[in-house]
Every structure is written in structure tokens, then in C-alpha cells.
Image (tube, rainbow, N blue to C red):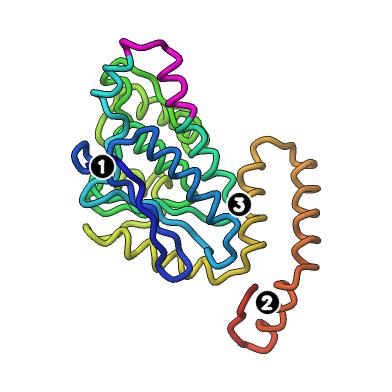
């Protein structure tokens, strides 16, 4: 069966499923392109309030297909560079997507699969899930923003350990380190992520967009610059129709229905 990225909606949540069971949901150019396309369409759909990315079956993703990578060694370096550009485009699409993206991880998230999970805004992982930055084990260096994500999420020594050693890391350790947000029972990562996505998606979409932008921009600005960015976003959101809905609902103790 060809590798594909399956798409379906669950309520107001878009579910993207990496489907390449023959190769443990290994990633490739077809999936990257489909991911960019799916997020592009969802970004302009006001009914979609969150996205969940999962792998088919009991594996999130084994990362790059090593057989394909071995074959690419016989091609021009431009071939692999183009493939990574496709992955980069998907990672950047996740970062710039205006609403939350949640990774629902069952089984293994290896190499670029781990990088993909890290690129998401939130991670739900099954208690028996395993994460591996496997690049150094096959004489490669990270892609998909894995080194960027870990360097921003962890102290340098811990990020270095995960990237240099290529060891299996369990959900509980990543939860303790603050990389995994929520731990589910085995087989329940998707349902846990969907419940969370529905709860988050009930909030005002414009406010969620502002929060996501502020978080990603924080490392690039001084405090003074960031304070100005917060001021701009706050004023914009205060004068959005949803602020009127939210404040009125709070004062009258009713459940808000945001636009």
C-alpha cells in the first residue's frame, strides 16, 4: 500500500493519520506534501478549531525510510535536500497554523517522527510509548527541527544527551521533563487528544492564534519588544467580537459560544 496521510474530522477537530504500515508509518515526500495541503485548507476553515496528528495502528512514526535514504545516497545530494525541504514545509506549516496542533503518540516516535511530535504545540502520549532521536545511531544528524525543538525545550545537556546517544526514552521521563503534556493509557492517546482538542477548541479561535504566535515569537524578542507585541495582540482581541461574547458570558455565568 502506498504511504498516505489520511484526513477526517471529529467534531471541530481535524485528525491527520500517517498511514504507511508496511514501513511502520515512515515519513516521505507524499506525506509531507499532504500535510502542508491539509493544514492549508484547515487554516481557512472556521469550523476547524484544532488538529490532531497520529500514526495508524500501534506506531506513531518510524521516521525516515532507511531503504529510501540508502537509495538516495546514489542520487544527487539535491534529491535528499528537496525531500527535507518538504519536511521543513510541513514543520513550518504546523508552527504557523493558527490553531493548536496536538500529537497523539502510540508506540514509537523515532527520528523524524519524534521531530514531528515535537513540532506540535502539545503532545499526548500513551504510557508505553517510546521516543528515539535515532539519527546518531545511523551516522546521521537531525532534521525536521528536532534539534531546534529540544534545544528550546530542555537544558543544553539534556538536549545533547537525547541527540547524541540515540537511546529509547519512555513517556514518563519526557512527561517529567515537560516535553509530553499528558499521559494516556495504552491505546487511548487519540481519544485523550480529541477530548483535549474539543475543550481547547471551545475557546475563542482568535485568542488561541494570538497565544500561539506570542509563544513562538517570545524567544526572538527582547522583553520590551515582546511587551509591545502583547499589547498589540491584547488590544486587537479586546475589540474582537469574541471578547464581548466571552466577557458577557463570564459576567452572566453562561457558557460562551465563540465565532
Task: Name the image quarter holding residue 163.
Answer: top left
Left/right placement of residue 136 relative to residue 22 reads right
The answer to if 83 sits in the magenta stretch is yes
Q: What whole-number distance in Å separates the C-alpha atoms at marks 1 and 3?
A: 30 Å
Q: Are marks 2 and 1 in contact (CB under 8 Å)?
A: no
Q: Secondary structure at mark 3?
A: helix
Q: Which residue range is magenta in the image?
A: 73-85
Q: Earlier in the sequence, mark 2 or mark 1?
A: 1
Q: Earlier in the sequence, mark 1 or mark 3?
A: 1
Task: Please give the label number shown on residue 212.
Answer: 3
Residue drawn at x 28%, y 36% as measured from the top left = 26
Q: Please, is residue 247 above or below residue 200 in the view?
A: below
Left/right placement of residue 259 relative to residue 120 reads right
* Residue for badge 1: 20
Q: Are marks 3 and 2 in contact (CB under 8 Å)?
A: no
Q: Magenta residues: mostly which secondary structure?
A: helix
Q: Residue 65, image x and y in percent? A: 27, 29
Q: Nearer the viewer, mark 2 or mark 1?
A: 1
Q: Please, is residue 153 above or below residue 157 in the view?
A: below
Q: Residue 41, image x and y in percent? A: 54, 53
Q: What whole-number distance in Å separates the C-alpha atoms at marks 3 and 2?
A: 19 Å
Q: Secondary structure at mark 2?
A: helix
Residue drawn at x 34%, y 38% as measured from the top left = 113
Quadrant of the rendering where the C terminus is positioned? bottom right
* Tally of numbered discs: 3
Task: Name the image quarter holding residue 102.
Answer: bottom left
Q: Nearer the viewer, mark 1 or mark 3?
A: 1
Task: Please give the label number shown on residue 246.
Answer: 2
The answer to if 26 sits in the magenta stretch is no
Q: Are marks 1 and 3 in contact (CB under 8 Å)?
A: no
Residue drawn at x 75%, y 77% as measured from the top left = 244
Q: Earlier in the sequence, mark 3 or mark 2?
A: 3
Amino acid at each position: 500500500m502506498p504511504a498516505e496521510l489520511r484526513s477526517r474530522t471529529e467534531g471541530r477537530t481535524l485528525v491527520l493519520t500517517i498511514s504507511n504500515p508496511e514501513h511502520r508509518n515512515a515519513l516521505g515526500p507524499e506525506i509531507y506534501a499532504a500535510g502542508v495541503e491539509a493544514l492549508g485548507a484547515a487554516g481557512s476553515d472556521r469550523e476547524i478549531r484544532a488538529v490532531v496528528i497520529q500514526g495508524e495502528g500501534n506506531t506513531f512514526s518510524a521516521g525516515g525510510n532507511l531503504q529510501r535514504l540508502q537509495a538516495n545516497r546514489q542520487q544527487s545530494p539535491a534529491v535528499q535536500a528537496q525531500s527535507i525541504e518538504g519536511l521543513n514545509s510541513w514543520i513550518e506549516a504546523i508552527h504557523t497554523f493558527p490553531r493548536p496542533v496536538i500529537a497523539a503518540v502510540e508506540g514509537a516516535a523515532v527520528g523524524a517522527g519524534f521531530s514531528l511530535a515535537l513540532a506540535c504545540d502539545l503532545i499526548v502520549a500513551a504510557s508505553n510509548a517510546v521516543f528515539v532521536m535515532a539519527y546518531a545511531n545511523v551516522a546521521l544528524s537531525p532534521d525536521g527541527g528536532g534539534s531546534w525543538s529540544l534545544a528550546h525545550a530542555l537544558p543544553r545537556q539534556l538536549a545533547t544527551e537525547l541527540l547524541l546517544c540515540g537511546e529509547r526514552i519512555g513517556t514518563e521521563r519526557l512527561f517529567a521533563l515537560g516535553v509530553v503534556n499528558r499521559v494516556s493509557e495504552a491505546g487511548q492517546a487519540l481519544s485523550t487528544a480529541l477530548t483535549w482538542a474539543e475543550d481547547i477548541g471551545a475557546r475563542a479561535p482568535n485568542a488561541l492564534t494570538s497565544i500561539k504566535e506570542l509563544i513562538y515569537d517570545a524567544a526572538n524578542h527582547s522583553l520590551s519588544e515582546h511587551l509591545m507585541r502583547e499589547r498589540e495582540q491584547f488590544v486587537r482581541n479586546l475589540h474582537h467580537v469574541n471578547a464581548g461574547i466571552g466577557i458577557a458570558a463570564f459576567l452572566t455565568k453562561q457558557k460562551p459560544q465563540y465565532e
